[in-house]
């Protein structure tokens, strides 16, 4: 029975056990490297951004000390604005014309 | 020196968020084919198993920098027990919860062989909650999230992960669709 069974053809390398069953081109080490570089890139990029934007005025969180300083600064700024608004000097022309005769004469050439 | 730690804390916080996005996405990908254009499931699984090597350093750097930053006023207890800070209790507390959940997920994964597979799976699902709390922590407390570019990238990655998480949930609830 066994001797009469037909011999199966050899399994092609492309579909055999050693086949490379890939749905994408990147190997595991490539994905790991990509993940590492992405994280590092986000770190470096944000570090650069944070370095140029140290004090973000509309940041959602402020520690108590920073908030107090910010409040004090805002209060003093408001006070300065108030003082400025109350002591504003209005500059108007004080030279007025008159109908009286001239006391001095100006020589004209 | 305080400003140095402050900058490091901000950068490492977003790096930890990016690393967690990669970790969660690579965990979802084998069932959802989210990364099938990039690699096969075995490679994606290898990436997922490796991601603690980027998540842990980034998260530890974020925590250490905040502990060393005197202005932030974060204590050791605040790292593990939520809602104890004197300011931003909800925003910082959510970050604390995400750290706690991260520790739970990592420890249960390391002791996976001692746990029943079903029990480990339930513990591992805490990572979804960990991602959500980390995202909310970033949104409520992230100084750099005020930048439109960073905000859009953060939202886009979160929406992408949310989409694939829902797809994964749908397949889990309806296994007949997988066989079809």
Image (tube, grey):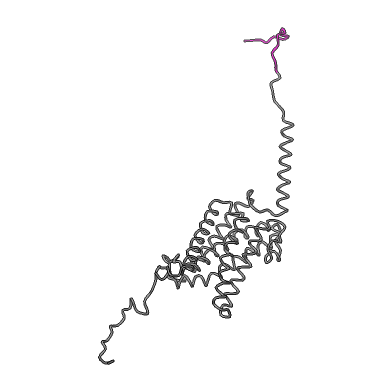
Of the 4 image quadrants, the one containing the C terminus of chain B is bottom left
Can you give x and y, in whole percent of width and height, for residue B85 in the image? 71, 60
At 72% from the left edge and 57% from the top edge, which residue is drawn? B86
* For residue A31, above or below residue A16: above
Q: Is residue B127 above or below residue A55?
A: below
Check residue A103 for magenta coloring. Answer: yes
Judged left or right of residue B123, residue A88 is: right
Q: Position of residue A64 (x, y in %)?
A: 72, 54
Residue A68 at x, y = what percent?
73, 50
In screen coordinates, is B14 left or right of B30? right
**Image quarter in which the N terminus of chain B is found:** bottom right
Q: Is residue A86 visible?
A: yes
- Indicate the position of residue B20 as horizontal and vertical percent values: 55, 65
**Main SS type for the magenta part?**
loop
Name which residue lies at 59% across and 56% down.
Answer: B139
| Residue at far top of view | A101
Image side of residue B135 versus residue A26, left or right: right
Residue found 69% across the figure and 65% down from its top:
B81
Magenta residues? Answer: A95-109
Q: Residue at x 71, y 66 (%)?
A: B77
Q: Is residue A48 magenta?
A: no
């Amino acid at each position: 029975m066994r001797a009469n069974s037909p011999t199966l053809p050899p399994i092609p390398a492309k579909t055999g056990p050693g086949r490379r069953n890939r749905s994408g081109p990147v190997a595991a080490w490539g994905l790991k490297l990509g993940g590492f570089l992405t994280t590092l890139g986000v770190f470096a990029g944000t570090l650069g951004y944070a370095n140029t934007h140290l004090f973000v005025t509309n940041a959602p969180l402020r520690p108590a000390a920073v908030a107090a300083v910010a409040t004090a600064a805002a209060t003093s700024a408001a006070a300065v604005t108030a003082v400025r608004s109350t002591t504003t000097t209005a500059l108007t022309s004080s030279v007025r014309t008159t109908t009286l005769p001239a006391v001095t004469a100006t020589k004209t050439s | 020196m305080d400003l140095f730690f402050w900058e490091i804390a901000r950068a490492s916080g977003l790096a930890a968020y990016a690393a967690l996005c990669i970790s969660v996405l690579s965990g979802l990908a084998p069932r959802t084919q989210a990364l099938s254009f990039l690699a096969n499931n075995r490679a994606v699984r290898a990436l997922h198993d490796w991601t603690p090597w980027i998540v842990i350093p980034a998260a530890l750097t974020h925590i250490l920098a905040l502990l060393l930053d005197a202005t932030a006023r974060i204590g050791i207890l605040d790292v593990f027990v939520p809602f104890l800070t004197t300011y931003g209790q909800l925003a910082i507390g959510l970050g604390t919860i995400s750290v706690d959940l991260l520790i739970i997920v990592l420890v249960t994964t390391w002791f996976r062989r001692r746990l029943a597979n079903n029990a480990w799976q339930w513990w591992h699902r805490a990572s979804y909650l960990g991602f959500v709390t980390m995202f909310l922590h970033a949104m409520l407390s992230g100084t750099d999230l005020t930048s439109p570019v960073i905000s859009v990238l953060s939202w886009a990655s979160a929406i992408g992960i949310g989409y694939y998480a829902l797809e994964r949930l749908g397949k889990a609830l309806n296994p007949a669709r997988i066989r079809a």
